[in-house]
Image (spheres, rainbow, N blue to C red):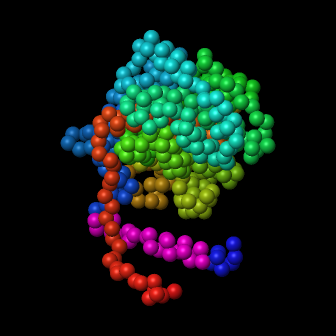
Amino acid sequence: MTQNDKEWLKRLCDMAVSSSLVDSSLYAKYDVKRGLRDISGKGVLAGLTQIGEVQAQTQVGDSTVPGPGRLIYRGIDINEIVQGFLAEGREGFEETCYLLLFGELPDSGELARFQRLLATNRALPENFVHDAILKLASRDVMNAMAQNVLALYVGDECADDISIENVLRQCIVLIATFPLLAAYSYQAYSYQYGNKSLVIHSPNPELPTAANFLHMLRHDSQYTPLEAQLLDLALVLHAEHGGGNNSSFTVHVVTSSGTDTYSAIAAAMGSLKGPRHGGANIKVVQMFEDLKKNVKDWEDDRQIEDYLLKLLNKEAFDRSGLIYGIGHAVYSVSDPRALILQDHVERLAAEKGLMDEMRLYEKVAKLAPEVIGHVRKMYKGVSANIDFYSGFLYRLLDIPTELFTPLFAMARIAGWSAHRIEELANAGKIIRPAYKSVAEMRHYVPLAERKK
């Protein structure tokens, strides 16, 4: 590309930006809820769902005030779900998938049957690993997975059938195969771009989802019961978060157009990949690595506060002005997922001899909201969210950062599937929100009369 071409493209880029900018005062003038949320963070009501609910307020008399966050799957509080399967010493992700898809908790017979159904579908088409995954290895595992989801369309003779029965079949296949797509896409990336040995383990039909993933990811297929239990817990906590989160809303929007399952799920993966959604836990881990280099005494609150102030002032880490893992679009007092994960991650940190680092995370979780409150005007409180601890958990599990967001997708495919079925079952109109044009009217100018 010549220097003139570069300068021309730069000028076109500047034109594209300047012609796209909207005067921020117009949003208030026309009462536009940017991000479909008002200034307090309350979302614009865009639909109804029976799948998941996120609560961040408590009723006190005639008023609603910020309260401890609650996450509810099909009417059941997430704390009850977690306490239930942990008390019985078993995994919970398969049970959670059943609950989200069918609206009821399975009995022991139904759960065993559903687990067998997933196991029998935990296989990819013949030559798929070689032709679709290894031959087309990507530098980004999320993009590779989305590409693989679309490739599965090719081998599905009923790919465009959007009857509930067929869509449910497709969703069960995707729930079952997402661990394979994640593990194998990473192995392909590691081999192609990291010059590492290529090891592909077939799934073990006797293992549940979390244990199977660790078996397929690790070259020696070894893991401890606690590692499998905590990864299973993370999958349960990430499986659903109401219809208003960006990727689940994407599923509703794309499904409403009448398109196929693979296209809807690939679109959701594109949404989840973003650092403001599923990619945030990677930023948390990277931020803490920078913090550990710059804070000499991890026990000194003042040193930690100074570093957090530098983050807010765009003087540290990525200069974004953010403390990653602190704050949420809905939760203010607490994120229930973070509280659950914090309690259990501590057990693994102790097992790995990393309690000093665990204490550092807890200190930042306590100090960050205070520092933010002193520096910025807040319309609602902030607290540690699930990304704050999930990245640390994945580090303790020796999971590469390239797989942090794919693990999120491996869990959220359950919620996405339920939301796709819900949109189809209600047969609503295509989702098409209104945008008001604020461009000035102009007249067409003949080509010969246009100025250079």
Residue 189's place in the image compared with 90, above or below, is below
Q: Nearer the viewer, residue 193 or 210?
A: 193
- 77 with respect to 154 (left or right): left
Assign the N terminus to one quadrant of the image.
bottom right
Note whether residue 333 is visible. Answer: no
Residue 11's place in the image compared with 183, above or below, is below
Q: Is residue 23 magenta?
A: yes
Name the outermost residue toward the left.
62
Q: Position of residue 352 (x, y in %)?
A: 69, 30
Q: Position of residue 332 (x, y in %)?
A: 40, 45
Name which residue lies at 59% across and 31% down.
Answer: 179
- 261 with respect to 142 (left or right): left
Name the outermost residue toward the front.
157
Could you tell me what secondary structure mostly forms the magenta stretch?
Answer: helix
Name which residue lies at 41% across and 17% down.
Answer: 106
Q: Position of residue 402 (x, y in %)?
A: 64, 43
The mark total stands at 0
Asked where in the image residue 249 lies, by quadrant, the reply is top left
Note whether residue 2 is visible. Answer: yes
Q: Position of residue 181 (x, y in %)?
A: 61, 35
Q: Is residue 26 magenta?
A: yes
Name which residue lies at 48% across and 46% down.
Answer: 267
Residue 291's place in the image compared with 176, above or below, is below
Q: Nearer the viewer, residue 336 or 173?
A: 173
Name which residue lies at 67% across and 28% down.
Answer: 216
- Magenta range is 8-30
Q: Nearer the viewer, residue 261 or 28?
A: 261
